[in-house]
Image (cartoon, rainbow, N blue to C red):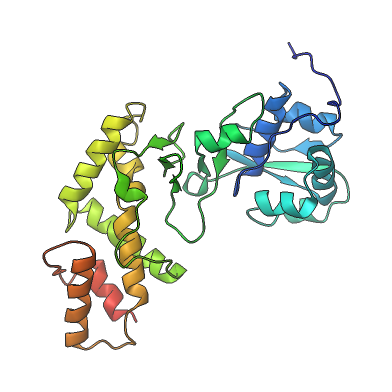
């Protein structure tokens, strides 16, 4: 039975505000929950036609035509440019982008690029009356993770229903020696390298195993299957070293590197990673990166 709700809401009524990088489907769901409605009911009340098949975030996202976005902006009292900047992650399909009518399209999101659970404390601050979960996209200049240093929460996999408590692993939020914002190319290489090291138990295995144990002990709600915490928490566990490695790769001298330059780089990198030495084998992806310049 549909919940009785005053429609339209009274002027000045509190409305949920979007989180930075929040998916449009997540925001619409939270906004509707403020009035005890579903997203479909909210869109219907705004006279916006819905197409596609809805599924709860993060499995689907929604694209809005310009007129639909205008109506949502008027309802939320958020300027269109601000609303678009907060929610738009990719251009809408041509059928939506060129439409003059107020229409939306629900589309499935592949698991590999689904948004991640947002910090619950940040979400509550932007969800008056009803603290529905929120889902946000990772920042483009970091690995696929969400970290809230203020509230000590993080997530790295959309299969986790809630963010993780990271208080037992303070190294996830503290500054790292030699780390800085790296280029996308270096960050991609670093993520690939540390993932290989993690999967093959190389170089930093004991440190990462300790970090995994602390995370799982502090978060008994982490599902144990079908994917193990060792897999779903991998990006979080390797995050500090991924940032340090990406920053180091950004400082590589021009190609080709001489043998002394390679040795000096590995020595500096071992120091920044707090390793006594770093001697990768020929098949190690780090060697491939040194030769790929």
Q: Nearer the viewer, residue 281 or 249?
A: 249
In the visual, does 213 lie left or right of 139?
A: left
Residue shown at 42%/56% (left/top)?
143
Q: Is residue 176 above or below residue 104?
A: below
Outermost residue toward the top? Answer: 1
Tell me the quarter of the picture where residue 108 sits. top right
Q: Position of residue 172 (x, y in %)?
A: 34, 49
Q: Nearer the viewer, residue 151 or 249?
A: 151
Label count reads 0
Q: Nearer the viewer, residue 124 or 255?
A: 124
Residue 53 appears in the picture as rendered: no
Residue shown at 51%/55% (left/top)?
139
In the visual, does 268 lie left or right of 64?
A: left
Residue shown at 77%/45% (left/top)?
78
Q: Position of residue 156 (x, y in %)?
A: 41, 44
Quadrant of image for the C terminus: bottom left
Quadrant of image for the N terminus: top right
Q: Position of residue 145 (x, y in %)?
A: 43, 49
Q: Is residue 228 above or below residue 113?
A: above
Tell me the quarter of the picture where residue 220 sits. top left
Residue 23 appears in the picture as rendered: yes
Q: Nearer the viewer, residue 279 or 171?
A: 171
Q: Position of residue 33 (x, y in %)?
A: 68, 26
């Amino acid at each position: 039975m549909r919940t009785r709700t005053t429609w339209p809401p009274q002027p000045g009524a509190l409305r949920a505000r979007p989180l930075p990088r929040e998916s449009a489907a997540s925001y619409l769901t939270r906004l509707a929950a403020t009035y005890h409605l579903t997203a479909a009911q909210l869109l219907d009340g705004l006279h916006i036609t819905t197409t596609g098949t809805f599924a709860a975030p993060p499995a689907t996202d929604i694209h809005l035509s310009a007129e639909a976005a205008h109506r949502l902006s008027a309802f939320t009292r958020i300027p269109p440019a601000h609303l678009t900047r907060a929610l738009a992650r990719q251009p809408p399909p041509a059928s939506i982008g060129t439409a003059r009518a107020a229409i939306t399209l629900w589309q499935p999101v592949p698991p590999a690029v689904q948004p991640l659970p947002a910090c619950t404390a940040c979400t509550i601050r932007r969800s008056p009356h009803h603290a529905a979960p929120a889902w946000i996209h990772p920042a483009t200049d970091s690995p696929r993770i969400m970290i809230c240093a203020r509230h000590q929460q993080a997530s790295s996999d959309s299969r986790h229903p809630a963010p993780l408590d990271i208080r037992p692993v303070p190294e996830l939020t503290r500054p790292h020696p030699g780390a800085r914002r790296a280029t996308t190319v270096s960050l991609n290489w670093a993520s690939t390298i540390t993932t290989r090291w993690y999967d093959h138990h190389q170089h930093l295995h004991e440190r990462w195993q300790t970090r995994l144990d602390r995370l799982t002990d502090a978060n008994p709600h982490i599902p144990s299957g079908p994917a193990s915490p060792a897999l779903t928490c991998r990006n979080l566990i390797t995050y500090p070293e991924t940032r340090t490695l990406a920053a180091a790769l950004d400082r590589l001298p021009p190609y080709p590197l001489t043998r002394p330059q390679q040795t000096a780089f590995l020595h500096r990198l071992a120091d920044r990673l707090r390793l006594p030495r770093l001697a990768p084998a020929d098949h190690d992806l780090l060697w491939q990166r040194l030769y790929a310049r």
